[in-house]
Image (cartoon, grey):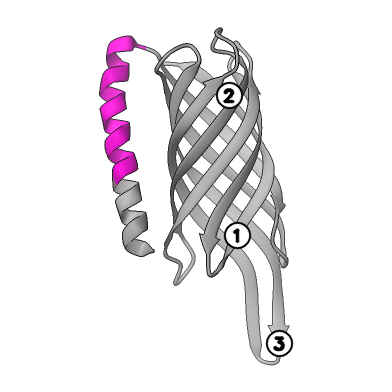
Amino acid sequence: MKKTTKILASAVAAIAIFFSVNANAQDTRKFGIGLNAGFPTNDGYSFAIGGDLRYQFDVSKQLSIPITAGFTSIQGEDVTIGTTTISYRYNYVPVKAGLKYFFNDSGAGVYGLAEAGAAFGTDSGAGTEFVFSPAIGYAWSNGLDLAAKYEGIPANGGTLGYVGIRLAYGFKL
């Protein structure tokens, strides 16, 4: 899985560089900052919180390519069994690229978003895993953006993830 994740992360970076060169010619770049909060879908975890930065360039008024990086913490309780303490916590840096499609031709309003990339674990002994994040949201023309999202990390025969919201503000570069 680790080789696959590294290959995927390299492919995402190469695609991002390719499209950023094309986006500079169109001057349709946007930059945003967002806050993510939600509820984990796994037992032992109580909440998820994080922040991200998103660079987005428009292919057309309806289709954009976002590149997102940030920090996410999925928190839970510490459970002690005998002399062993199990910490239900996972902190990671997600680096993702994807497609954002607006359902009308104004470049604002309701959109669907699908992103995938790598989650770089920051805790001791954590590795790099695949991460995916579908969302549906609404972007106002003044830069505000609100989305309902799921973010998941397939690992150890299951998926660690959360359902939440992303509140962001974006501006044109």
Q: Amino acid at mark 1?
A: Leu
Marks 1 & 3, CB-CB < 8 Å contact: no
Residue 118 image point, x, y percent: 42, 51
Quadrant housing residue 161: bottom right
Q: Which residue bears the numbered disc 1?
A: 160
Secondary-structure class at tag 1: strand
Secondary-structure class at tag 3: strand
Q: Quadrant of the C terminus?
A: top left
Q: Which residue bears the numbered disc 2?
A: 169
Q: Is residue 22 above or below residue 13?
A: above
Tell me, yes or no, whether the highlighted magenta stretch contains residue 19: yes
Q: Quadrant of the N terminus?
A: bottom left
Q: Which residue bears the numbered disc 3?
A: 81
Local packing at callout 3 (Cα closer than 10 Å; few below 14, some 14-19, many 20+) is few
Give the CA distance from mark 1 to mark 3: 22 Å
Q: Is residue 119 above or below residue 63?
A: below
Quadrant housing residue 160: bottom right
Tell me, yes or no, whether the highlighted magenta stretch contains residue 161: no
Q: Amino acid at mark 3?
A: Ile
